[in-house]
Image (tube, helix red, strand yellow):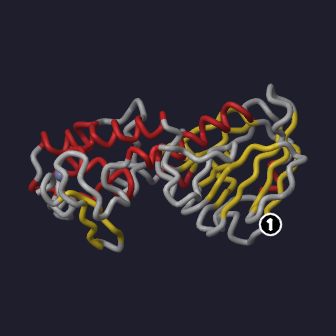
Amino acid sequence: MPELPEVETVRAGLAKYVTGKKITSAQAFHPRAVKPSSIAPITSLAGSRIKSVQRRGKFLWLTLDRPYALVAHLGMSGQLLVTPTTTSPHKHMRARFMLSGGLSRSNNEIRFVDQRTFGWVGVEEYAGDVPISVAHIALDPFEKEFDLAKVINRIRKRKSAIKPTLLNQEIISGIGNIYADEALWRAKIHPEIVCEDLSKAEVKRLINCAIDVMQEAILAGGTSFDEQYKNVNGESGYFERSLAVYGQEGEPCPRCGSAIARIAFANRSSHFCQRCQR
Ligand SMILES: [Zn+2]
Protein backbone atom coordinates (compact mmCIF):
# COMPACT_ATOMS: atom_id res chain seq x y z
CA MET A 1 0.00 0.00 0.00
CA PRO A 2 1.47 3.37 -0.97
CA GLU A 3 2.46 5.47 2.05
CA LEU A 4 3.83 9.01 2.25
CA PRO A 5 7.14 8.35 0.41
CA GLU A 6 5.41 6.59 -2.49
CA VAL A 7 2.68 9.23 -2.79
CA GLU A 8 5.31 11.99 -2.61
CA THR A 9 7.26 10.31 -5.43
CA VAL A 10 4.07 10.26 -7.52
CA ARG A 11 3.32 13.89 -6.60
CA ALA A 12 6.79 15.04 -7.66
CA GLY A 13 6.52 13.11 -10.93
CA LEU A 14 3.11 14.58 -11.72
CA ALA A 15 4.33 18.09 -10.85
CA LYS A 16 7.22 17.68 -13.27
CA TYR A 17 5.12 16.51 -16.21
CA VAL A 18 1.65 18.03 -15.90
CA THR A 19 1.96 21.46 -14.23
CA GLY A 20 0.62 24.12 -16.59
CA LYS A 21 -1.16 21.64 -18.86
CA LYS A 22 -4.82 21.89 -19.73
CA ILE A 23 -7.17 18.94 -19.24
CA THR A 24 -8.84 18.54 -22.62
CA SER A 25 -11.01 15.54 -21.67
CA ALA A 26 -11.44 13.00 -18.87
CA GLN A 27 -13.13 9.61 -18.68
CA ALA A 28 -13.78 7.02 -15.97
CA PHE A 29 -14.09 3.30 -16.79
CA HIS A 30 -15.05 1.70 -13.48
CA PRO A 31 -17.91 2.55 -11.08
CA ARG A 32 -15.53 2.58 -8.09
CA ALA A 33 -12.91 4.78 -9.75
CA VAL A 34 -14.75 7.99 -8.88
CA LYS A 35 -15.48 8.67 -5.21
CA PRO A 36 -19.25 8.76 -4.51
CA SER A 37 -18.88 12.16 -2.81
CA SER A 38 -17.37 13.72 -5.96
CA ILE A 39 -19.35 16.92 -6.58
CA ALA A 40 -19.24 16.43 -10.37
CA PRO A 41 -18.34 13.76 -12.92
CA ILE A 42 -14.68 13.92 -13.94
CA THR A 43 -15.74 14.74 -17.51
CA SER A 44 -16.57 18.21 -16.13
CA LEU A 45 -12.83 18.89 -15.66
CA ALA A 46 -12.40 19.40 -19.43
CA GLY A 47 -11.09 22.90 -20.11
CA SER A 48 -9.43 23.40 -16.71
CA ARG A 49 -5.71 24.09 -16.34
CA ILE A 50 -3.45 22.34 -13.79
CA LYS A 51 -1.76 24.89 -11.55
CA SER A 52 0.10 22.63 -9.10
CA VAL A 53 0.19 19.16 -7.56
CA GLN A 54 -0.16 19.00 -3.77
CA ARG A 55 -0.04 16.29 -1.10
CA ARG A 56 -0.90 15.76 2.54
CA GLY A 57 -0.20 12.35 4.03
CA LYS A 58 -1.37 9.82 1.43
CA PHE A 59 -3.78 12.23 -0.34
CA LEU A 60 -2.84 13.93 -3.60
CA TRP A 61 -4.62 16.76 -5.38
CA LEU A 62 -4.27 18.86 -8.49
CA THR A 63 -5.08 22.53 -8.01
CA LEU A 64 -6.89 23.90 -11.06
CA ASP A 65 -7.91 27.31 -12.33
CA ARG A 66 -11.31 26.45 -10.82
CA PRO A 67 -12.77 26.66 -7.30
CA TYR A 68 -12.44 22.88 -6.92
CA ALA A 69 -9.64 20.33 -7.06
CA LEU A 70 -9.05 16.93 -8.61
CA VAL A 71 -8.27 14.73 -5.60
CA ALA A 72 -6.76 11.23 -5.75
CA HIS A 73 -6.09 8.48 -3.23
CA LEU A 74 -4.08 5.47 -4.39
CA GLY A 75 -5.71 3.05 -1.92
CA MET A 76 -3.97 -0.35 -1.94
CA SER A 77 -2.70 -0.56 -5.49
CA GLY A 78 -3.45 2.68 -7.34
CA GLN A 79 -1.00 4.11 -9.88
CA LEU A 80 -1.04 7.48 -11.60
CA LEU A 81 0.97 7.10 -14.79
CA VAL A 82 1.98 9.87 -17.17
CA THR A 83 2.17 8.53 -20.70
CA PRO A 84 1.99 9.54 -24.34
CA THR A 85 -1.60 9.24 -25.59
CA THR A 86 -0.37 6.68 -28.13
CA THR A 87 0.53 4.10 -25.42
CA SER A 88 -1.91 1.17 -25.59
CA PRO A 89 -4.44 1.11 -22.71
CA HIS A 90 -3.18 -0.40 -19.46
CA LYS A 91 -4.86 -3.41 -17.86
CA HIS A 92 -6.93 -2.16 -14.88
CA MET A 93 -7.08 1.39 -16.29
CA ARG A 94 -9.87 3.07 -14.27
CA ALA A 95 -9.73 6.65 -15.56
CA ARG A 96 -7.76 8.79 -17.99
CA PHE A 97 -7.12 12.51 -18.34
CA MET A 98 -6.06 13.86 -21.74
CA LEU A 99 -3.83 16.93 -21.57
CA SER A 100 -2.48 19.60 -23.87
CA GLY A 101 0.17 22.31 -23.61
CA GLY A 102 2.86 22.54 -20.95
CA LEU A 103 6.57 21.88 -21.27
CA SER A 104 6.59 18.10 -21.66
CA ARG A 105 4.61 17.74 -24.88
CA SER A 106 5.04 14.02 -25.44
CA ASN A 107 3.46 12.96 -22.12
CA ASN A 108 -0.09 14.09 -22.70
CA GLU A 109 -2.11 11.73 -20.60
CA ILE A 110 -2.56 10.82 -16.92
CA ARG A 111 -3.83 7.27 -16.42
CA PHE A 112 -5.28 6.04 -13.15
CA VAL A 113 -4.57 2.30 -13.00
CA ASP A 114 -5.80 0.31 -9.99
CA GLN A 115 -5.98 -3.46 -9.84
CA ARG A 116 -7.73 -3.75 -6.46
CA THR A 117 -10.04 -0.70 -6.89
CA PHE A 118 -9.62 0.71 -3.37
CA GLY A 119 -8.19 3.92 -4.84
CA TRP A 120 -10.30 6.74 -6.23
CA VAL A 121 -10.33 10.14 -7.90
CA GLY A 122 -12.90 12.85 -7.28
CA VAL A 123 -13.81 16.48 -7.82
CA GLU A 124 -13.95 18.36 -4.51
CA GLU A 125 -14.41 21.85 -3.17
CA TYR A 126 -11.96 23.30 -0.68
CA ALA A 127 -12.29 23.53 3.09
CA GLY A 128 -9.73 26.27 3.74
CA ASP A 129 -6.48 25.49 1.92
CA VAL A 130 -7.15 21.81 1.26
CA PRO A 131 -9.88 19.77 -0.44
CA ILE A 132 -12.75 18.63 1.80
CA SER A 133 -11.69 14.97 2.14
CA VAL A 134 -8.18 16.08 3.17
CA ALA A 135 -9.42 18.52 5.81
CA HIS A 136 -10.16 15.80 8.40
CA ILE A 137 -6.65 14.32 8.44
CA ALA A 138 -3.75 15.57 10.53
CA LEU A 139 -0.71 17.33 9.10
CA ASP A 140 2.07 15.06 7.92
CA PRO A 141 5.57 15.51 9.39
CA PHE A 142 6.95 17.08 6.19
CA GLU A 143 4.56 20.04 6.33
CA LYS A 144 5.95 23.39 7.49
CA GLU A 145 3.17 23.80 10.08
CA PHE A 146 3.73 20.33 11.58
CA ASP A 147 3.96 20.88 15.33
CA LEU A 148 6.15 18.12 16.81
CA ALA A 149 5.56 19.10 20.45
CA LYS A 150 1.78 19.08 19.98
CA VAL A 151 1.80 15.66 18.30
CA ILE A 152 4.02 14.22 21.06
CA ASN A 153 1.52 15.45 23.67
CA ARG A 154 -1.44 13.99 21.79
CA ILE A 155 0.24 10.61 21.43
CA ARG A 156 1.26 10.48 25.12
CA LYS A 157 -2.36 11.00 26.26
CA ARG A 158 -3.58 7.88 24.49
CA LYS A 159 -4.35 4.56 26.16
CA SER A 160 -3.98 2.57 22.92
CA ALA A 161 -0.84 0.81 21.67
CA ILE A 162 1.77 2.87 19.84
CA LYS A 163 1.61 1.00 16.51
CA PRO A 164 -2.08 1.70 15.69
CA THR A 165 -1.60 5.24 16.98
CA LEU A 166 1.17 5.85 14.45
CA LEU A 167 -1.20 4.57 11.76
CA ASN A 168 -4.02 6.89 12.91
CA GLN A 169 -4.23 9.51 10.16
CA GLU A 170 -6.04 11.94 12.46
CA ILE A 171 -3.00 12.12 14.77
CA ILE A 172 -0.17 12.12 12.22
CA SER A 173 -0.75 11.45 8.52
CA GLY A 174 1.26 9.58 5.90
CA ILE A 175 2.57 6.63 7.94
CA GLY A 176 1.36 3.13 7.07
CA ASN A 177 2.38 -0.38 8.09
CA ILE A 178 5.81 -0.42 6.42
CA TYR A 179 7.17 2.85 7.80
CA ALA A 180 5.55 2.35 11.22
CA ASP A 181 7.40 -0.97 11.64
CA GLU A 182 10.66 0.56 10.42
CA ALA A 183 10.35 3.64 12.66
CA LEU A 184 9.54 1.52 15.75
CA TRP A 185 12.58 -0.68 15.05
CA ARG A 186 14.87 2.33 14.62
CA ALA A 187 13.55 3.87 17.85
CA LYS A 188 13.80 0.48 19.69
CA ILE A 189 10.14 0.60 20.77
CA HIS A 190 7.87 -2.46 20.96
CA PRO A 191 4.76 -2.02 18.75
CA GLU A 192 2.34 -3.01 21.55
CA ILE A 193 3.57 -0.57 24.21
CA VAL A 194 0.75 1.68 25.42
CA CYS A 195 1.29 5.32 24.38
CA GLU A 196 0.89 6.81 27.84
CA ASP A 197 3.72 4.58 29.11
CA LEU A 198 6.21 6.15 26.69
CA SER A 199 8.34 9.13 27.75
CA LYS A 200 8.35 12.39 25.84
CA ALA A 201 11.90 11.60 24.68
CA GLU A 202 10.86 8.18 23.38
CA VAL A 203 7.93 9.55 21.35
CA LYS A 204 10.13 12.32 19.98
CA ARG A 205 12.78 9.78 18.96
CA LEU A 206 10.08 7.65 17.31
CA ILE A 207 8.67 10.50 15.21
CA ASN A 208 12.13 11.61 14.21
CA CYS A 209 12.91 8.02 13.16
CA ALA A 210 9.68 7.99 11.09
CA ILE A 211 10.74 11.24 9.41
CA ASP A 212 14.25 9.89 8.71
CA VAL A 213 13.09 6.56 7.27
CA MET A 214 10.47 8.23 5.05
CA GLN A 215 13.02 10.82 3.86
CA GLU A 216 15.42 8.01 2.91
CA ALA A 217 12.58 6.18 1.15
CA ILE A 218 11.67 9.29 -0.88
CA LEU A 219 15.29 9.46 -2.06
CA ALA A 220 15.02 5.79 -3.13
CA GLY A 221 11.79 6.44 -5.06
CA GLY A 222 9.64 4.61 -2.48
CA THR A 223 9.09 0.94 -1.59
CA SER A 224 7.59 -1.42 -4.19
CA PHE A 225 7.12 -4.29 -1.78
CA ASP A 226 4.14 -5.94 -3.50
CA GLU A 227 5.06 -4.73 -7.01
CA GLN A 228 1.84 -2.67 -7.14
CA TYR A 229 3.42 0.68 -6.43
CA LYS A 230 5.00 2.43 -9.42
CA ASN A 231 6.10 6.01 -10.04
CA VAL A 232 4.50 8.08 -12.83
CA ASN A 233 6.87 6.48 -15.35
CA GLY A 234 5.82 2.96 -14.33
CA GLU A 235 9.10 2.29 -12.47
CA SER A 236 9.41 0.60 -9.06
CA GLY A 237 11.10 2.21 -6.07
CA TYR A 238 14.03 0.43 -4.47
CA PHE A 239 13.74 1.18 -0.75
CA GLU A 240 12.62 -2.41 0.03
CA ARG A 241 16.31 -3.34 -0.13
CA SER A 242 16.82 -1.11 2.90
CA LEU A 243 13.96 -2.44 5.02
CA ALA A 244 15.22 -3.67 8.40
CA VAL A 245 12.09 -5.46 9.67
CA TYR A 246 9.04 -5.09 7.41
CA GLY A 247 8.52 -8.39 5.55
CA GLN A 248 11.74 -9.77 7.10
CA GLU A 249 10.20 -12.42 9.40
CA GLY A 250 12.88 -14.94 10.42
CA GLU A 251 15.72 -12.86 8.94
CA PRO A 252 18.43 -11.57 11.29
CA CYS A 253 17.91 -8.16 12.89
CA PRO A 254 20.46 -5.81 11.23
CA ARG A 255 21.36 -4.46 14.69
CA CYS A 256 21.60 -7.51 16.97
CA GLY A 257 21.27 -10.57 14.73
CA SER A 258 18.25 -12.18 16.44
CA ALA A 259 15.41 -13.35 14.22
CA ILE A 260 12.79 -10.77 13.26
CA ALA A 261 9.36 -11.73 14.65
CA ARG A 262 5.92 -11.13 13.15
CA ILE A 263 2.75 -10.78 15.20
CA ALA A 264 -0.81 -10.28 13.98
CA PHE A 265 -2.18 -7.32 15.85
CA ALA A 266 -5.08 -4.90 15.24
CA ASN A 267 -5.83 -6.62 11.90
CA ARG A 268 -2.30 -6.06 10.67
CA SER A 269 1.08 -7.70 10.87
CA SER A 270 3.81 -6.11 12.93
CA HIS A 271 7.42 -7.00 12.28
CA PHE A 272 9.90 -6.29 15.06
CA CYS A 273 12.99 -7.48 16.92
CA GLN A 274 12.14 -9.10 20.25
CA ARG A 275 15.60 -8.34 21.61
CA CYS A 276 16.02 -4.69 20.52
CA GLN A 277 12.38 -3.62 20.97
CA ARG A 278 11.24 -4.42 24.51
ZN1 LIG B 1 17.62 -6.57 17.16
In the displayed structure image, the side of residue 201 where residue 59 appears, left or right: right
Q: Residue at x 71, y 55 (%)?
A: 112
Residue at the far right: name it: 86
In the displayed structure image, the side of residue 133 where residue 170 appears, left or right: left
Report the amino acid beneath label 1.
Phe
Residue at the far top: name it: 103
Circle 1 residue? 29
Q: Position of residue 171 (x, y in %)?
A: 33, 52
User: Eyeballing the image, is 59 above or below 76?
Assistant: above
Label 1: how many residues lie within 10 Å, few (<14), some (14-19) or many (20+)?
few
Mark 1 secondary-structure assignment: loop
Q: Position of residue 57 (x, y in %)?
A: 46, 47
> Residue 264 is drawn in which quadrant?
bottom left
**Does the image show residue 128?**
no
> Residue 247 is drawn in which quadrant?
bottom left
In the displayed structure image, the side of residue 221 where residue 107 appears, left or right: right
> Residue 109 is drawn in which quadrant?
top right
**Does the image show residue 236?**
yes
Relative depth, front residue between 127 and 215: 215
Q: Residue at x 52, y 52 (%)?
A: 224
User: Eyeballing the image, is 98 above or below 89?
Assistant: above
In the displayed structure image, the side of residue 36 where residue 202 appears, left or right: left
Q: Residue at x 59, y 59 (%)?
A: 228
Quadrant of the rendering where the C terminus is positioned? bottom left
Relative depth, front residue between 14 and 86: 86
Q: Position of residue 75 (x, y in %)?
A: 56, 61
Q: Position of residue 173 (x, y in %)?
A: 40, 49
Q: Residue at x 22, y 51 (%)?
A: 155
Instruction: Determine whether the beta carbon of the residue marked 1 sits less than 8 angstroms from the nearest atom of ligand 1.
Output: no
